[in-house]
Amino acid sequence: MPLKAAIVPVTPFMQNCTLLWDETTNIGAVVDPGGDVDRIRNGIAKAGMTVEKIIITHGHIDHAGGAAELKDALGGVPIEGPHLADKFLLDNLEGQGAHFGLEGVRNVTPDRWLDEGDTVTVAGATFSILHCPGHSPGSVVLVNEPQRFILMGDVLFKGSIGRTDFAYGDHDALIGAIKTKLLPLGDDYSFICGHGPMSSLGEERQSNPFLV
């Protein structure tokens, strides 16, 4: 049964926190709860979801800053992702929060780190994990082949790519991951990215100025 998706914009960065659920069972997951946890919980209630897990694509505050609070609010559901290489970011979420003037942010340790070749299930649907560093060292992308659907995080956007002007950023690694791991999947894959509108790999292959 295809999964349903809804986006809850959170934090001043307008990050796309994504709710995924099965309409038959109403079981699902929250992807990248960066903050505004009350807003996320309202979205969960509106969808009628029972959340079985939280998924984090990478360790930036706008994607992970609300994960610890949401985990507690949902009775301790497990957190999966990102890759272990982003541990230093998750260990300093409180510092990131102080830097941006965001209150209530807590450091978080996932129940499960993700690596290339792992799989994550959401309401019985399987997502394959691709490790796509560059925006952050531990960024992961989740790929669902049957629905030709990707949870992209901040790796690739409509018309752009993730920032790499951090001390730990790596532009060449990011472009390499996009060109060798993502584009070969096929033009018909659509994706939800961390900010802004959805797109498809085919559209980005043809028009994204960083890839053309």
Image (cartoon, helix red, strand yellow):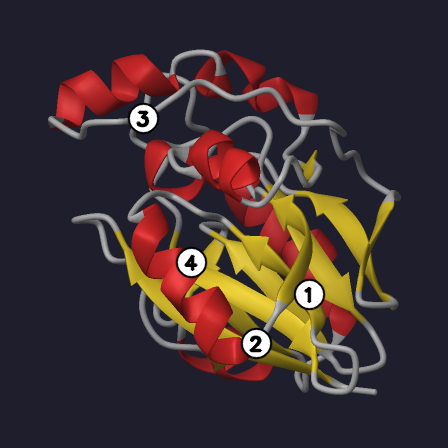
Residue at horizontal 44%, vertical 34%? 69
Label 2 Cα crowd, 10 Å radius (few <14 / some 14-19 / many 20+): some
Mark 2 and 4 residues: CB-CB less than 8 Å, in contact?
no
Mark 4 or 1, which is nearer the eye? 4
Residue 200 in sight = no
Q: Mark 2 points at which residue?
A: 48
Q: Name the residue under label 1.
A: 28
**Amino acid bearing label 3:** Val
Mark 3 or 4, which is nearer the eye? 4
Circle 1 sits in a helix, a strand or a loop, which is it? Answer: strand
Mark 2 and 1 residues: CB-CB less than 8 Å, in contact?
no
**Amino acid bearing label 1:** Gly
Sequence-first disc among 2 and 1: 1
The image's mark for residue 149 is none
Sequence-first disc among 4 and 1: 1
- Compare residues 40 and 155 and report the one nearer the observer: 40
Sequence-first disc among 3 and 2: 2
